[in-house]
Image (spheres, rainbow, N blue to C red):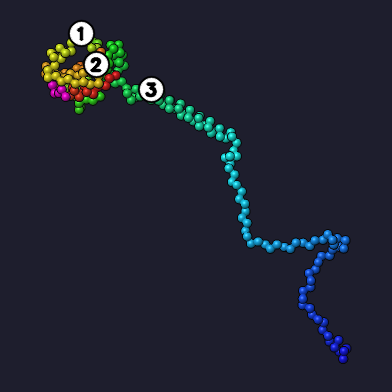
Amino acid sequence: MDDMRGRYRVPRRDYDLPPPSRPHVDESLRHAYRPPPPAQPKSSTHVPPVEQPAVNHRQLAPTQHHTQPKKRRWTKIFLSLVILVGLAGASWWYYPKFFNQNPFPANIQTNASNLGVSLFYPKRLPAGYKVDKSTFRINNGAIIFAANNGEPRLVFTIQKTPSSLDFGTFYKDQFKNRQQFDTAYGTVVVGKNQDRYLGSLVSTNTWLILSTNSTSISSDNLSLVLHNLKRY
C-alpha cells in the first residue's frame, strides 16, 4: 500500500521565485566586494541645452579693416572737391562765352576800350523791332547801330561824354515836353526835338543818344528801350 502511494506521489511544486543570484566571488576577495548601487530612476524633467553665445564677427575683425574704409572715404571727399572746383572754373569760363556773349563785334569792342566808354545794348525793344547787325559802325569817334522795324528805325549813338557840354542847358534848349527818370546806369531824359522824339543817357564817361527817323515812334517807345539797357 505504501509502495503504491510512493509510486504515484507528485513532487511539490514551488511557484515562489528563486532568490536573486549573487555573482561568484572568490573567498579571498569577498571582503573587498561591494555590490553595485541600485539604479536611479530616470527623471522625466527635460534639461534644455545650454545656448552658446553669439559670436560678434565685427569684434573679431582685425583693426586694419576699420582704417581702410576711412582712407577711401577721405579719398572720395577729395576727388569730389576737385570735381566741384573744376566745374566752377569751367562755368566761369564758359558762361561769358556762351550764355553772356558780348553782342558787339570785336572791332567795336576794341574801339570802345580805346575810347574808354561803355557799350549799351537793348534787352527789350518795342514790338516788331530787331537790332540790325549790319548797322554796327564807327563814325567820328562814335559807335552807331540801329534797330529796325521795316522803315522805322531806332538809332543808338554811343560816344565819350563831352566835358564842356552843359547838359542842363542842352536839355532845356533841345528837348520839348521832356520827361526825366533814373535808371541803374544814370539819369535818362526823353523829349521832342523838332518833330521827332529823342532820348539821352549820361553814364559817367559815356553818353548814349537814342534817336529815330520816324514820327510814329512815341516817347513811350524810347522810354521802354532806355529802361531796358545792358552795359558791356
Question: Between tags 2 and 3, which lies in front?
Answer: 2
Q: Please, which residue is most extreme toward the front here?
A: 31
Q: What stretch is highlighted in magenta?
A: 215-220
Please give the residue where the numbered disc 1 appears in the rendered image. 164
Please give the residue where the numbered disc 3 appears in the rendered image. 93
Distance between the Cα atoms at labels 3 and 1?
41 Å
Q: Please, which residue is most extreme toward the bottom here?
A: 1
Residue 172 picture location, percent across and down? 13, 14
Q: Is residue 147 visible?
A: no
Tell me the amino acid under the disc marked 2: Ser
Viewer-proximal residue, 102 or 57?
Answer: 57
Q: Which of the image's four quarters has the N terminus? A: bottom right
| Residue 155: quadrant of the picture | top left
Please give the residue where the numbered disc 2 appears in the rendered image. 203
Q: Earlier in the sequence, mark 2 or mark 1?
A: 1
Residue 88 picture location, percent across and down? 40, 25
Question: Residue, x 53% and y 30% (percent of image)?
Answer: 71
State whether residue 9 is above or below residue 142: below
Q: Which of the image's four quarters has the C terminus? A: top left
Q: Indicate which disc residue 139 carries.
A: none
| Residue 21: quadrant of the picture | bottom right
Label pair 3/1, CB-CB below 8 angstroms: no
Viewer-proximal residue, 91 or 74?
Answer: 74
Which SS class for mark 3? helix
Viewer-proximal residue, 50 or 112?
Answer: 50
Which SS class for mark 2? strand
